[in-house]
Image: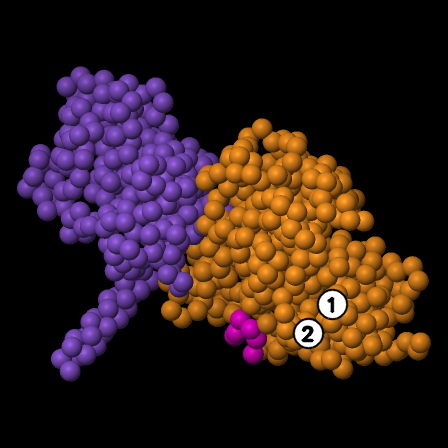
Amino acid sequence: MPIIVTKRALNPVVSLMELECPAIAKKALPGQFVMVRVDEKGERIPLTISDYDSVRGTITIMYQRIGLTTQKMDLLNPGDILLDVVGPLGNPTELEGVKRAVVIGGGVGSAIAYPQAKYLYAAGAHVDVIIGFRSKELVFMEESFRRNCTNLYITTDDGSYGEQGFVNQKLEQLLAEGNQYDLVLAIGPVPMMRAVSNSTRPHNLKTIVSLNPIMVDGTGMCGCCRCTVNGETKFACVDGPDFDGHQVDYEELMNRLSVYRPQEAEAVEKHNCNLQRQADEMKKGEDR
Amino acid sequence: MAFSNAPRTPMPEQDPVIRACNFKEVALGYTEEQAKGEAARCLQCKNPLCVQGCPVNVRIPEFIAKVAEGDFEGAYQVITSTNGLPAISGRVCPQERQCEAKCVRGIKGEAVAIGRLERFVADWHLAHQTSHAVPMYPNNYRHVAVVGSGPAGLACAYDLANWGYSVTLFEAFHTVGGVLVYGIPEFRLPKSIVGKTVEELRALGVQIQTNMVVGRVFTLEELFEQGYDAIFLGTGAGLPKFMGIPGEELAGVFSANEYLTRVNLMHAWEDGYDTPIPASRSVAVVGGGNVAMDAARCARRLGAEVHVVYRRDQAEMPARAEEIHHAMEEGIQFHFLTNPTAVLNDGNGRVKGISCVQMALSETPDEKGRRAPMVVPGSDFVMDVDTVIMALGTSPNPLIRMADPTITVNNRGCFVVDEETMQTSREFVYAGGDAVTGAATVILAMGAGKRAAKAIDEKLGGNRCQLH
């Protein structure tokens, strides 16, 4: 039973949950994900495993409280059970033999990039980390990253913390300064992964991106997560989620990600109305 | 004994106009009187060909004789001596190509409605049972892991549990049943029926572990280390195929697996469930199998105008005759000898139609014995749809191969097995169902699961061999 061991907010929009999942914790590797269902009527959503501890038998997931499921998840507390957690799914990121890497995370993607940085750094690689956020209050995991990389660079869009600018600009600067890398790993919003891939393309620098398409089963059955990579149809759940950043059709990915946006917004609104109603009713009860 | 010469008893059904707006079961089942009447049509052949036509060799005349006598529980016992899942097979088997195709009464008239009688008996038992099944043989303290809880896995687990084995059933989804729950819709196979079958398995002592992706969580080696003496892989054919035509990446193009999973497993059509499904105006379903019929009929129930697009003619459709008939009754439009060439973009990444060509069938059959469809030049036209569902078949799930990459698979990714024992290239590892054959039928998968169970029992020197 996936019991919630710890839960805390990392910033105003991202939360962390540590779950007791010994079988998954034993097998998880950087880059893999779990499918989560929050209650009997819930949908299945993929969430990347952002940390795992085979001794404690736990995995950690981080989620942006933006969709219906993640908002429902956020109502749960330590000791509660997250109904279904399936994994580890997807192929682990290929990190063998990497000597010098840049690990780039954008927003909540930083959480997903963390296990890669940690793994590489523990394996003795030189790891430069660039994490980017919109502004200061959204910055999270700074200390965790600092302990697990050679150099940490933080960028904010508005310059309220770290360096002002985008992660790909920082990357371009590092490359212009003559830094040599054998791998760039970029995880975050699709436009950010595309920008990073565009920055590394002229350098012919191997760039891996982790794709986040909509999934239903996550085990290679529904085909919902199909993406075009190098002109071929690939299923992110079984062929990925990592792909060569220079070969991904990002336009298509963004289009497919937008399919349910109107329905999602409606569902979230309905959910919030329900919560408000419940809160009002509880308050009424207290007043009595 | 006098045999009834009455015509085949029709199946009571929901009215097509009404049922096209609900997900309740279409076929309502025989009454006791109807069942007895239909059973009286059976000629009780001394050499029953129907039994040969059945992939799991149900002793058909014997059970039908019991139905005719009104001994419905007796009939159930006869059926379940060879088929543990009659409520399911009675509903989804293509009987017209199996038992009923061989029925002597079918030569000059209509075959006995064997499938409907099987369903009646199973439903009667479920409605009247007072206790759960108990294993036929005592526990033999041998452990078998059954991976995948679709028809192959369920049939294998049922037999082994009955014979005294400790069986653990591993399922990747949160619900047991495989294609019976994610693929086949409620109106054709109510999920309560699958649920009752699963309850029977639990009563027989089968342990069920859902949310377990063997291949990812455990390798086969690890399962053996955990103490399993044999493993059965019934992991199905999951990976959907696409046509490879332009526009398949557009929003509004689904694999049938995705569409059906959203509707059936995730209840997207029901109020209060979170999984979204588009409110389609007009849907094209590409394909001619049962999966295509299921997807088309789901889309119809969700309120869309539905077009089935199939590149051969009706006679060549692989779907059960009854499903095609039901779909037509429900107002689904069929476009035979038609093939899509592209999905059209509305300019915003959404589907606005499909362009199609007309096909003609070759005079001479191809190497597979089917007349090959050929494009009729200059026959292009556009079909106005906002959703496209591709029901073109599937290939085996790739994850299970990670559980042991040394096991031999063929060029399509299907496990290669000994046809008699269903053993794979690895000793003590068996496989059956779509994971071996590629997409096929529920009953063939059940048959394969049963053959594997028998082989596992013999291999492990099981109870049955010792007691007989």
The N terminus of chain B, quarter of image: bottom right
Letter of the chain shown orange in the rendering: B
Residue A42 x/y as whole percent: 38, 60
Q: Is residue A149 left or right of residue A36?
A: left
Give the SS element for disc 2: helix
Q: Which mark is residue B76?
A: 1
Q: Amino acid at mark 1?
A: Tyr
B19 is within the stretch colored magenta: yes
Q: CA distance from mark 2 to mark 1?
A: 9 Å
Per the rendering, the colour in which chain A appears is: purple
Q: Which residue is mark 2?
A: B124
Residue B106 x/y as whole percent: 85, 66
Kindly identify the residue that appears in the image at 57 percent across and 63 percent down.
Answer: B199
Q: Mark 2 touching mark 1, by CB under 8 A?
A: yes
B466 is within the stretch colored magenta: no
| Viewer-side residue, B372 vs A38 | A38
Q: Is residue B93 visible?
A: no
Which residues lie in the magenta part?
A: B18-24
Kindly identify the residue that appears in the image at 71 percent across and 80 percent down.
Answer: B31
Which of the two labelled residues, at mark 2 and mark 1, occupies the earlier sequence position? 1
Residue B321 x/y as whole percent: 71, 63
Q: Which mark is residue A267?
A: none
